Image (spheres, rainbow, N blue to C red):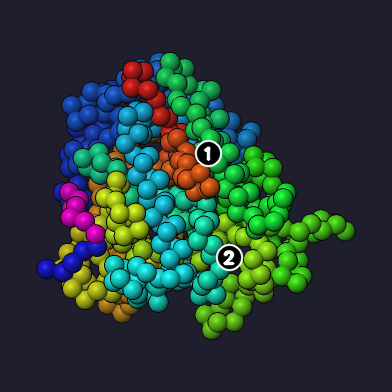
Amino acid sequence: MGRRVPGTYRATMATTLKPARPSPGAGGYPLDAGHFDEAFAATGAPRRPYAELLDALARCDLAALRERVRSNVRAAGLQFGPDREIDVDPVPRLLTAEEWEAVEPGLRQRARALNAFVTDAYGPQRIFDAGVVPRRLLETSEGYEPVMRGLIDPEAPPATVAGLDLVRDGDGEFRVLEDNLRMPSGACYAFAVREVVAPELETELRPHDLDQGYVEAMRAAILAAAPDGRGEPKAVILSDGPENGAWYEHERFGRELGLAVVAPEQLEASRGRLFARRGREREQIDVIYRRLDEDRLCEPDGSLTDLGELLLPALRSGRVRCLNCFGTGLADDKLTHAYVERMVEFYLGDEPLLRSVPSFDLSDESARAEAMERLEELVIKPRGGFGGHGVTIMPRATEPQRKRALGLLRRRPEHFIAQETVAISTHPTVCGSSLQPRHLDLRPFVVSGPEGETAMTGGLTRYAQKAGEMVVNSSQGGGCKDTWVVDGEQG
């Protein structure tokens, strides 16, 4: 048998290969025996702490509730991209404080290990020399930025913000589906979704504050990254501008953190320094929080991009530091995800507290042979993909989709990973005037700064709008839910 990387978990395949017969929950809500439903147990009884919320929803006009939330979204200008209003469902996802306390340490641990990996990859490369992670990962990753070698300060986490995509499997256990360190978005959307949903719900449940020091930790991390000797450092958020899908978040973080949001054309480089120009005035910049879609400093042939010409001299001089720096896309590589549990053990000397959804390294001959034998059961992902693009869920794919995926794997297996299929959990969602189950994930956020890691209390829940759909990303039409962490006695 070939070797998978890492872990021994195998997802239950029955619900993806042969749909289970739905069973009725409370009020006729359809339960699928193969999927963990967040709100209802298999018996149809509400799970703790959902009883109070479900009673409140039963007393209201669901269609009117959804319309009020939609009106709040419009009033807040909550958009994804320049012309797409975010779809927000009014039914929040609930986690007990005990559930969250079990997950949060694993989030912080994973962010710490991934930051150690990125720092090592652009520094001494110990993990590759030790054979814990194959060097071919570094040599073939689209996210690796060679010109950043030696430019990452080992004392400052290269990814100040990490967003980890969690799913619940058929047993209700949280698993890490993907890691996002390059440019994770959603933190400010989580704040905004809370603001448009919570006022419309008449319930005695009281969610914990999402922030609880998250924004302050982010501010501290940004200022701490400034080069030595800068008494009052100047930091900016570097953005593409309104055409960026997360422009709402860029603007809001600018307000929350008291930082200017600038585009590359507003920057000037001079003698190893970087300046932001405003009219006739210009101001020296010490720290950049990068939120650009463009993240390459050099072309495939090694020549510098326009962005590289602008920023690299200042980065090399040490007069500018970049947070979520260029090259952190290495950690977003789907093949990197396959080795994160080993990174936790190698860099931290700990057992992983959160388990990954296991993956097959298709560059490894034995792992590839095993994956090809089970291909109809697996999910195929391009290593450099994001937002759900290019993903083929083989048990649900059409015959043309399967043939295309198989052809790509046979031609360029090193560009893909195969991942175990997970029976992703469902959650009650307003559809018309009733509640229907929709699949969802959770993106919590971790800030890494001078005082360690700080996790947002909850994060952003994303859901698929179509029945049975598994891809929940906003770029693929998914919507958002508020995530409430509540004290157990409230339920």
Magenta stretch secondary structure, dominant: loop
What segment carries the magenta color?
Answer: 6-12
Q: Residue at x 66, y 70 (%)?
A: 317
* Residue 470 appears in the figure: no
Q: Is residue 88 above or below residue 307?
A: above
Q: Quadrant of residue 318?
A: bottom right
C-alpha gap between disc 2 and disc 1: 26 Å
Return the residue at label 2.
Answer: 294
* Amino acid at dot 1: Tyr
Q: Quick one: 266 or 212, which is closer to the camera?
A: 212
> In the image, residue 350 lies at what x, y percent?
29, 51
When asked about the image quadrant of residue 7, the answer is bottom left
Q: Position of residue 254 (x, y in %)?
A: 66, 45
Q: Residue at x 77, y 70 (%)?
A: 270
Q: Secondary structure at mark 1?
A: helix
Q: Specify the amino acid type for callout 2.
A: Glu
Earlier-in-chain disc, 2 versus 1: 1
